[in-house]
Amino acid sequence: MAQEIRKIKESFEKDLEKGKSKDFFQELKVKYLGRKSKISELFSNIPNLPKQERGRWGKELNILKNQISSAIEERLSEKIQKEERLDLTYPAKRPQKGSIHILSSVTKEICLIFKELGFNVIEGNEVEDEWHNFSALNIPLDHPSRDAFDTFYLDLAKKDKKSGNWLLRSHTSPSQIRIMQQVDPPLAVISPGRVYRPDVVDATHSFMFYQIEGFVVGQDINFSYLKGTLLYFARQFFSQEVQLRFRPHFFPFTEPSAEVDVSCVICSKKNKQKNQDRCPVCKGKGWLEILGCGMIHPDVLEACNIDSKKYQGFAFGMGVDRIVMQKYQINDIRLFYENDINFLKQFSI
């Protein structure tokens, strides 16, 4: 028995020095400690030994078994640590760099342009009540925009009878009301944010989109101030060559009101016949609608406790999604919200 144990030790030591891989050490473990190993065979022969020698050789075999097992585990652990050690000198893959979403970056760009004109940037609440979202803006009770098909009403208890139901704001104009209630004129504020309407999602509509509301309140404010402000914005944002066109329109909260078009930045309106079949943006019309605007209705000022005989103001609102689509020739609004990295990385800075 002593000779057999000595042979196993010598053989194991030679094999252990040959080890170069994790698989080799696993095979070595099976060879010396498995059910068909020489050690298992010696264990099975112990009952055939004289009774007084069984305990001694059983103990010797257990010691040998533990020594072999410990030696294999130690070498295996060293091998694993060596293979998994971090080599700081090894060239690594450059991690992907994140970037600001195109809608966020354009919103910031627009706000910075108006800050140059002295506007303050203030974000409003996304959850509003009917008074701030409709009534204070001179929107009557029977107006279609108050219908549940056009507004997301919330199942929350009313604050009071005057405020009405809670809802997700359908435009950024409630910010205008809250600021005029809290701060005395003169005022010049730009208010960006998300708005919500239960529209059917398609290439040009979404149930959530971004708007920017701007307004000025002061003494002797007239429509010329509005036109000059918007022209400055358009030339800073699009191009110094662009022109604006004001078309009469109706909004309950402004009087007079207008929709504003900007001359196409891709093709000149002077060459619209020539570019009619080519321009992917304006389709040869030469003009693109970008926002609505007007002089703040006296009833809106009075609702905010501002003397409409002493103060006047103008307001404008634009959809950020639409402006980005026009500027970058994007034909589907859904691309902004699908998190397609191949689309978004085109605008990364």
Image: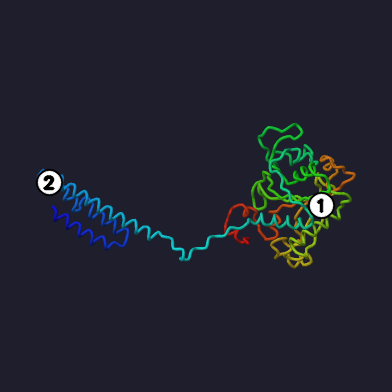
Decide: few, some or many residues near mark 2? Use Cα within 10 Å; few <14, some 14-19, many ≥20. Answer: few
Mark 2 vs 1, N-terminal side: 2
Q: Residue at x 71, y 56 (%)?
A: 323
Residue 121 picture location, percent across and down: 74, 51
Residue under numbered circle 2 = 53
Quadrant of the rendered image containing residue 131: top right
Residue 144 in the image: x percent, y percent?
A: 75, 41
- Which label number is shown at residue 258? 1
Do tag 2 and tag 1 residues touch (Cβ < 8 Å)? no
Colour approach in the figure: rainbow
Which x, y percent locates residue 203? 65, 53
Q: Residue at x 21, y 48 (%)?
A: 62
| Amino acid type shown at disc 1 | Ala
Q: Secondary structure at mark 1?
A: strand
Q: In the displayed orientation, state which residue is furthest to the left.
A: 50
Tell whether 304 sits left or right of 4: right
| 184 or 140, nearer to the observer | 184
Q: Residues within 10 Å of mark 1 (few under 14, many from 20)?
A: many
Q: Residue at x 64, y 50 (%)?
A: 202
Quadrant of the rendered structure where residue 181 is?
Answer: top right
What is the secondary structure assignment of the residue under circle 2? Answer: helix
Q: Where 78 sits versus 164, above or below?
A: below
- Hey, what amino acid is under mark 2? Glu
Nearer to us in this view, 256 or 186? 186
Picture quadrant where residue 51 is located: top left
Q: Where does the image place residue 239, in percent across and percent down from the top left?
A: 75, 64
